[in-house]
């Protein structure tokens, strides 16, 4: 029999009640207020639609928590799925598709942890901008000590201090460039990749050496007796401090 659905806040015509299913034909549903569809632990299934579309926020929420979102396989048995699970967050997070242009598919605005083996076929290190401390590459967050963005430091096993090619102790160990000014473990240290240093080191394409001036790089190898010659990368720009930071693990002490 035909009837009008308005008990749930929807109004429509040409609805056929078959006692088990309600069929909507030839019209749209109009919601006149906020409504709740209570399933009573039953499954709600959409089948046969070519597409299910919404032009507003679609939220999965169960009180103060939310169930997993499951994405089922497109082939195979059709029974296997990937679960998207959201644990407790300190603030809202965003996954954006794409970022600013069509060349960047997705961006995540918070720290990510990958627990299993991952393969990245093409990892692009773009030349950084002109702001000191900008970096694209491998970053660590450990160690004490105050650092200044764009300056170079060595790690002595506990704290970060200015590197200096004048002596073995300050030039031959684990090194990095500070991403910002503050505590090293908080702001992060670039240990390999594109980074903008606070001083210009030479002409684009030059080999970058650790300098005898504390915390800086140079395109001229140190020549003083006892100084350390250590290649730490390549100059990427002639005026703005951008370098490819790729410190060699070997070094030579001048006689």
Image: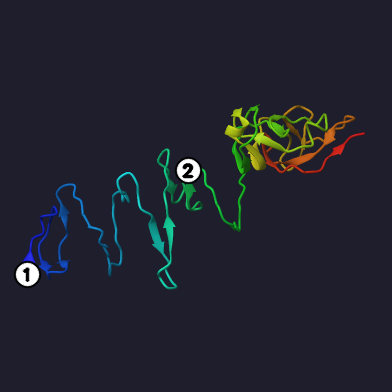
- Residue 109 shows which numbered tag? 2
Which element is circle 1 on? loop
Seen from the viewer's position, the closer of residues 39 and 104 is: 39
As displayed, is residue 148 above or below residue 47?
above
Q: Position of residue 241 (x, y in %)?
A: 67, 34
Name the residue rendered at 61%, 51% in the picture. 124
Name the residue rendered at 49%, 42% in the picture. 110
- Residue 1 shows which numbered tag? 1
Between disc 1 and disc 2, the foreground one is 1
> 10 Å neighbourhood of mark 1: few (<14), some, or many (≥20)?
few
Q: Position of residue 96 (x, y in %)?
A: 43, 48
Seen from the viewer's position, the closer of residues 170 and 84 is: 84
Q: Position of residue 67 (x, y in %)?
A: 35, 53
As displayed, is residue 71 above or below residue 93?
below
- Tag 1 near tag 2, CB within 8 Å: no
Left/right of residue 216 with respect to residue 91 in the rendered view: right
Name the residue rendered at 55%, 53% in the picture. 115
Left/right of residue 79 with respect to residue 110 in the rendered view: left
Q: CA distance from mark 1 to mark 2?
A: 53 Å
As displayed, is residue 27 above or below residue 249?
below
The quarter of the rendered structure image containing the C terminus is top right
Which element is circle 2 on? loop
> 10 Å neighbourhood of mark 2: few (<14), some, or many (≥20)?
few
Quadrant in the rendering for residue 121:
bottom right
């Amino acid at each position: 029999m035909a009837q009008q659905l308005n008990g749930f806040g929807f109004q429509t015509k040409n609805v056929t009640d078959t006692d088990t299913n309600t069929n909507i034909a030839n019209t749209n549903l109009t919601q006149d207020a906020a409504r709740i569809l209570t399933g009573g632990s039953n499954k709600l299934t959409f089948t046969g639609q070519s597409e299910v579309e919404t032009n507003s926020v679609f939220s999965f929420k169960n009180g103060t928590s939310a169930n997993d979102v499951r994405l089922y396989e497109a082939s195979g048995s059709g029974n296997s799925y990937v679960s998207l699970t959201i644990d407790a967050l300190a603030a809202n997070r965003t996954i954006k598709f794409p970022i600013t242009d069509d060349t960047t598919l997705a961006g995540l605005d918070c720290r990510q942890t990958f627990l299993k083996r991952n393969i990245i076929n093409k990892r692009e290190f773009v030349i950084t901008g002109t702001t000191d401390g900008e970096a694209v590459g491998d970053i660590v967050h450990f160690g004490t000590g105050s650092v200044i963005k764009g300056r170079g430091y060595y790690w002595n096993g506990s704290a970060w201090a200015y590197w200096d090619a004048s002596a073995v102790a300050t030039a031959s160990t684990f090194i990095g460039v500070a991403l910002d000014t503050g505590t090293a473990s908080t702001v992060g240290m670039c240990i390999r990749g594109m980074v903008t240093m606070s001083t210009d080191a030479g002409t684009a394409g030059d080999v970058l050496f650790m300098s005898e001036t504390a915390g800086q790089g140079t395109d001229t190898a140190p020549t003083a007796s006892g100084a350390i010659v250590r290649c730490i990368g390549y100059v990427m720009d002639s005026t703005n401090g951008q370098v490819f930071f790729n410190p060699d693990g070997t070094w030579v002490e001048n006689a």
